[in-house]
Image (cartoon, helix red, strand yellow):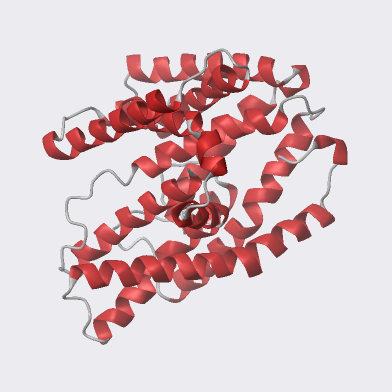
Amino acid sequence: MRGIASLLVVLTHIEVKGSQYGNGALRGFSVGGAGVDLFFIISGYVMCISTYNKPVNFSQFIIRRIQRIIPLYWLVTTIALIVYLYKPDLVNSSGGETSIFASYTLIPNGKKLLNQNGWTLSYEFFFYFIFGAFLGKGTIKAMQVSSLIILLLVLTGLCFNFNEYLFTFFTSSYLIEFVFGMGCFYLFDKKVIRIGYKYGVGLIVLGLLLFYLQMVIAIPYSEKWRGVVWGIKVLPIFVGLLSLEGLIRRSSALIKRLLLEIGNSSYSLYLIHPFTLSGTALCLRRLGMVSNPWLFTVILLVTSLIIAHLVYLYVERPLTSLAKRRYGVSKTAGRI
């Protein structure tokens, strides 16, 4: 699912590049942003499953998340900073003020980041702090209390209108998607419900149908409902794929192995692909190869996947290992 989510995000940005270069690549592909919603649901689920029955406290949990996320993010941000200092118009060319402080701290202030994709990490860490604060009482208690807090925050945001950015951030409907993920952990891993393969396939079809209708009809909705509206569409696909876990585990299909590899390198792909897309598109323009939208799309996608996998193997993994050795925590914290 991480592989699918990262592919959706990359394809969305290829569509943007296509419009910039006037070749209509993936024109009308408006649902790729659902990759972010899927990532948030996955995060809620994985944080529960990776801490369940493990003696981990708040500080251990947060340190593990910092070790996993920050090293590569800071490296990519620093590269973007060098570009920004040399030629500012190459960073966030669509407009808006860029904040170096927010770029490194991930503290939201309404300004753009040097690597704008980092905006999702601000939501991730906000969720981590809420969830981790109650881990001392066990994963189930942390899941229950953090879900209640998030639901109250989202409900506040939906009921009241304030133009303050921090209010908008801390009450964003995106947060509800972490609750969806935690709920799926409780229902599936605690064996509260069981869904057969046929129903799982049906749920996936339902989710795809909802997104198809969104593309065809383009039902309007307020931006503050974004996480709820898109989260509800992604949730059936997530639950459907969870119910197919046994079947997928036994499969030796090439597409499964490919998506697993893309999933492993999904974080590198998410952070690196904006640079890859920009550089590759510039090269294609100089070579006179931007007029064919399909060729343009394939080259940008394949190049992004290859470079991201190389970054994962030779940059992300070594950086993460170094961070764990240098700033390690007790082994009893488990692998989070």
Q: Image quadrant of residue 22? A: bottom left
Q: Name the quarter where the C terminus is drawn.
A: top right
* 117 over 130 or under it: above or below: below
**Residue 96: percent from the left, percent from the top?**
33, 54
Near-viewer residue (80 or 273): 273
Residue 289 picture quarter: bottom left
Q: Residue at x 84, y 43 (%)?
A: 329
**Residue lying at the far bottom of the rendered structure:** 287
Task: For residue 133, say whether it is visible.
Answer: yes
Hey, which residue is sitting farthest left in the picture? 217
Q: 290 and 167: which one is in front?
A: 290
Horizontally, is 273 left or right of 204 in the view?
right
Relative horizontal placement of residue 293, taking residue 146 as reference (left or right): left
Q: Position of residue 228 (x, y in %)?
A: 35, 25
Residue found 59% across the figure and 38% down from its top: 125
Q: Does residue 297 lie above or below 100 as drawn?
A: below
Please report the residue visible at 18 percent of the width from the left and 40 percent of the height from the top.
Answer: 215
The residue closer to the viewer here, 169 or 43, is 43
The mark total stands at 0
Residue 163 visible in the picture: no
Instruction: Please give the name of the residue rendered at 31% of the width and 78% of the height, measured from the top-left corner.
Output: 282
Q: Position of residue 73 (x, y in %)?
A: 58, 56
**89 w.r.t. 30: above or below:** below
Query: Would you place residue 146 above or below residue 82 in this image?
Result: above
Could you tell me residue 97's position as x and y percent? 38, 54
State left or right for residue 41 relative to residue 236: right
In the drawing, does residue 223 fall left or right of residue 7? left
